[in-house]
Image: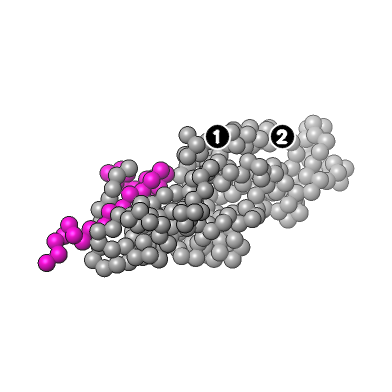
Amino acid sequence: MTTPSERLATCRFYAELNDFLPPADRQRPIERRVDAPGAVKDFIEALGVPHTEVDLVLINGEPAGFLQPVRAGDRVSVYPPFRGLDLTPLGRLRPARPAEVRFVLDVHLGRLAGYLRLAGFDSVYRNHCADETLASIAQADARILLTRDRELLKRRIVEWGYWVRETRPHSQLAEIVRRFDLGPLLRPFTRCGRCNGLLDPVAKEEIAGRLLPETRQAHREFHRCRGCGQLYWRGSHVEAIERLLASATKARWHDEE
């Protein structure tokens, strides 16, 4: 007869994957009962970690794909992506990042969407999108799905996704810039923070009637959104965003600390 201890598999999560675990399970092996073999993806996600956060799985020390079964007695080790460390020879699980970095954000991240747009990134956000729609947009347009909902990232069709840890929009922007190494890709103030449209230079004379007298006097250069017509000029908010982006690009990520 099989004893309960013989029906257990052991799993260990590393680095920031511990963010998803209850405090009692962090930085230690976790034992779970396995009555029948099942895909390691399901085993990992049942413990709370979405597959989109995982870059390498070892079962008994050997690289494993998400569909490889976990059996009683197995030792599972789960690793996140590491900047500066190429896991390809070991069988990394995440697909290559889309050549064009574009985002789709859930309903909780409207302010972050605006900041990403101002940083120059194509970022889809609608305050009424259902989870199924967000996942479909991410798959169809090869977008990175950003969310505060862990369960959303467990949908099979989501290839690139990330659970945003920070809760304040400024901190969220810095987190995303660091996490996806966006520093070299920043193109500040080329997109509209309101609608995601591209910005074009516009002559002051053409829009003078829309400007307050003090704005007309203080500024020479203006941009207008192709989509919604919103006007932009170099105000104090521009300098604040530039300082935030500069700070984010200088910060370091987990594996570099």
* SS assignment at label 2: loop
Q: Position of residue 237 (x, y in %)?
A: 66, 35
State the residue in front, 116 or 225. Answer: 116
Which residues fall within the magenta stretch?
Answer: 1-26
Q: Position of residue 171 (x, y in %)?
A: 52, 38
Position above or below: 236 against 46: above
Please give the count of numbered marks on the rendered protein. 2
Question: Which label sits in the foreground, 2 or 1?
Answer: 1
The image quadrant of residue 213 is top right
Q: Position of residue 221 (x, y in %)?
A: 81, 38
Horizontally, residue 198 falls left or right of residue 175, namely right
Other-residue count near label 1 (Cα within 10 Å), few / some / many at <14 / 14–19 / ≥20? few
Kindly identify which numbered label has been placed on residue 235: 2
The image quadrant of residue 226 is bottom right
Give the colour scheme of this rendering.
Answer: one colour
Other-residue count near label 2 (Cα within 10 Å), few / some / many at <14 / 14–19 / ≥20? few
Q: Name the quarter where the N terminus is drawn.
A: bottom left
Q: Earlier in the sequence, mark 2 or mark 1?
A: 2
* SS assignment at label 1: loop
Residue projecting furthest to the right: 205
Residue type (three-letter) at the residue carrying disc 1: Ala
Kindly identify which numbered label has been placed on residue 251: 1
Task: Give the alpha-carbon distance from disc 2 to disc 1, as whole Å.
Answer: 25 Å
Q: Is residue 20 magenta?
A: yes
Residue 124 appears anywhere in the view: no
Residue 226 appears anywhere in the view: yes
